[in-house]
């Protein structure tokens, strides 16, 4: 793995780059849609690539539970299983273990919980997480980490990030898959000094790339940006940085300005399945009565398969009828909007025109997180 | 509209033809998937055409209720609304009024019922049905008919078919849309003499094509074929014949042998959404454990978008996860199977090898109707 920085903003940490991975190259800053269960929900892989998506994020926790590793290995690994021969990252599942698995028991060794699929007892350790991701075979893997809730006591967050550091060391020791880069993950909640501590210590361990986890979990926008800045200040500038679970169009611009290279978030696809459409004039809801007889596409000039062939009136009808084609078409439109946004963002960074892009996004003032 | 018969079986009524319609030509016998709500469920129009579908069936009853005619007209008619610039037939909605709308009151004037969408009182008359279909603008429209349940008393069936004849006359008088062919509909339940009576009288009214309704509603295979033969014996041989709501692969072959040119049925798409996959080795169920780690496609050699890119193991995983991509991919496969079947059927008729095709379908012995 290698990040070539092709443009550096003279007025911020923002940069444009090419991230070269085992299965291809990604222009950064890039947005990676979630394909936790080996599919971008409601969409096929070919059309996702067609709207400009460069890289996807799978999830070790979900895929370990279902379909299980045997099925994926029998098909030649995750890329071939999901028919996505392009760059792919797998999350360790730390976030899901801590947010979804109940009851769970966090110990130094790992986290134990009952499988929600078959009720069996599972001990998720750093080593198991690395083994799962080795067998999945994505281009980038993540160590097991603890993602603290918001709010969380400072003392708890500190103890937790120290354990995450020890787990990172174990993950690094267990990891050996060629062609797969294992990132380090920064935690520390909303406490800037803890974020800096986590970044310093994780960077000392030495990883080819870093992820910033545990943000966009309920904290204010200012808290998020402050925690992000504290982490960024202590990370090496030549390694790619992935801000996990972020975010809204405005978040992407503001956080790229802090030097973030990779983003992932369920927002564009989840919003689409709830009828919320992203446009350069701000969000619109497809169920609104004003669209009932509107023959226009969601956005004039958009080249996505949805806007190319279908009217707002038709999409509203499909959505009301709970027809899955609606979820797919709205998802593809939102993914195209995000791909377009990232392309404009790279252009704005390279030409030092971030302020212009921010004003183009003025319709997106509210913090619209999922 | 014009049906050119290009091959006639020397040993049966079966024939191969080209049905020329306002928006294109259809090779017959043809199978038309259902797009009752202006979409083939779970599929996009482009990919449906790609797997070999030539013509679709919309539904006046469903579309009148939602989204309503204003939305469809605002988008330039049903073809443009659903982005299907190819041949399209609309059913009058008679079957749906009688099978779905409750409570309902059948009078000479028409059928009244409460809208299941907004509770308003609706009087569905032959004239309204024609007006709706005129405004939808499909290539072929159907008159309002009464579809009797099975079983039904002979006397009731006779009174009903006589009313259907009077309604057919009113529909013909009301119909005037250029480029749209209004078919006549034959009823008569499972009573061969009533089927013949209905066919004789409907043919006397004179339509450019005929549909046979009210079969595949619960009667035995033998009853269905006998009723079909009685109707066919009294219909002009130069007009296209559409057998409504039929059927299984075996039904399609056996009924094409009786001279049927057009079929429609929810079977391939509904079965797909329930995980039942159609192959030349018979049906398979995607949830069966044997597929869990199977890297093979649903059917070796199949050129559908599902078999081209995805394994049984992946499809089983998606289906278990209730991911709508599974419904779409299985639907496309089943539609491809039907398109392939019809193509082989046309070839078998033209070369007088129907018996061979029947033996190829030996895995499909059970009557698998939805």
Image (spheres, coloured by chain):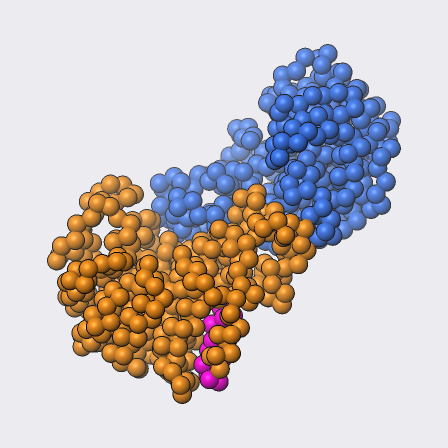
Chain colours: A orange, B blue
Residue B39 position, x and y percent, is: 61, 46
The residue nearer to you, when weighing B106 against B340, is: B106
B335 on left or right of A142: right
Query: For residue A340: magenta?
Result: yes
B189 on left or right of A229: right
Residue B12 position, x and y percent, is: 73, 31
Q: Quadrant of the C terminus of chain B?
A: top right
- Relative height, residue B70 to residue B259 (above, below): below
- Give the residue displayed 62% in from the left and 67% down from the top: A301
- Relative height, residue B205 to residue A39 (above, below): above
- Relative height, residue A83 to residue A241 (above, below): above
* Dominant secondary structure of the residues highlighted in magenta in the image: helix
Q: Quadrant of residue A149?
A: bottom left
Q: Quadrant of the N terminus of chain B?
A: top right
Q: Residue furthest left?
A: A108
Q: Quadrant of residue B134?
A: top right
The residue nearer to you, when weighing B9 against B147, is: B147
Q: Which segment is the magenta one?
A: A339-352
- Give the residue displayed 51% in from the left and 70% down from the top: A361
The residue nearer to you, when weighing A8 against A79, is: A8
Query: For residue A182: magenta?
Result: no
A223 on left or right of B33: left
């Amino acid at each position: 793995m290698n990040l070539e920085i092709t443009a550096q903003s003279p007025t911020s940490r923002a940069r444009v780059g090419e991230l070269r991975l085992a299965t291809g190259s990604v222009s950064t800053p890039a947005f990676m849609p979630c394909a936790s269960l080996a599919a971008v929900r409601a969409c096929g892989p070919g059309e996702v690539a067609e709207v400009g998506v460069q890289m996807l994020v799978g999830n070790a926790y979900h895929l370990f539970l279902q379909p299980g590793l045997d099925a994926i290995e029998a098909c030649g690994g995750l890329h071939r299983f999901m028919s996505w021969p392009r760059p792919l990252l797998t999350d360790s599942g730390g976030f899901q273990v801590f947010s979804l698995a109940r009851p769970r028991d966090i110990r130094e060794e790992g986290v134990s919980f009952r499988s929600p699929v078959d009720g069996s007892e599972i001990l998720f350790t750093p080593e198991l997480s690395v083994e799962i991701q080795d067998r999945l075979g994505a281009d980038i893997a993540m160590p097991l980490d603890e993602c603290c809730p918001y709010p969380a006591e400072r003392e708890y967050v500190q103890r937790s990030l120290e354990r995450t550091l020890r787990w990172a060391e174990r993950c690094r020791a267990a990891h050996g898959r060629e062609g797969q880069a294992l990132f380090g993950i920064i935690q520390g909640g909303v406490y800037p000094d803890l974020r800096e501590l986590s970044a310093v210590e994780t960077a000392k361990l030495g990883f080819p790339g870093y992820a910033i986890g545990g943000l966009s979990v309920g904290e204010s926008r200012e808290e998020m940006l402050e925690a992000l800045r504290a982490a960024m200040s202590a990370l090496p500038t030549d390694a790619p940085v992935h801000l996990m679970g972020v975010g809204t169009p405005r978040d992407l611009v503001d956080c790229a300005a802090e030097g973030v290279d990779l983003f992932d978030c369920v927002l564009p696809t989840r919003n689409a399945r709830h009828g919320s459409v992203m446009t350069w004039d701000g969000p619109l809801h497809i169920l609104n009565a004003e669209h009932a007889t509107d023959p226009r596409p969601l956005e004039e000039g958009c080249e996505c398969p949805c806007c190319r062939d279908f009217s707002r009136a038709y999409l509203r009808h499909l959505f009301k009828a709970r027809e899955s084609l609606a979820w797919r078409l709205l998802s593809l439109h939102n993914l195209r909007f995000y791909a377009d946004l990232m392309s404009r963002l790279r252009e704005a960074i390279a030409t030092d025109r971030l302020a212009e892009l921010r004003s183009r996004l003025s319709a997106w003032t509210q913090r619209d997180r999922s």
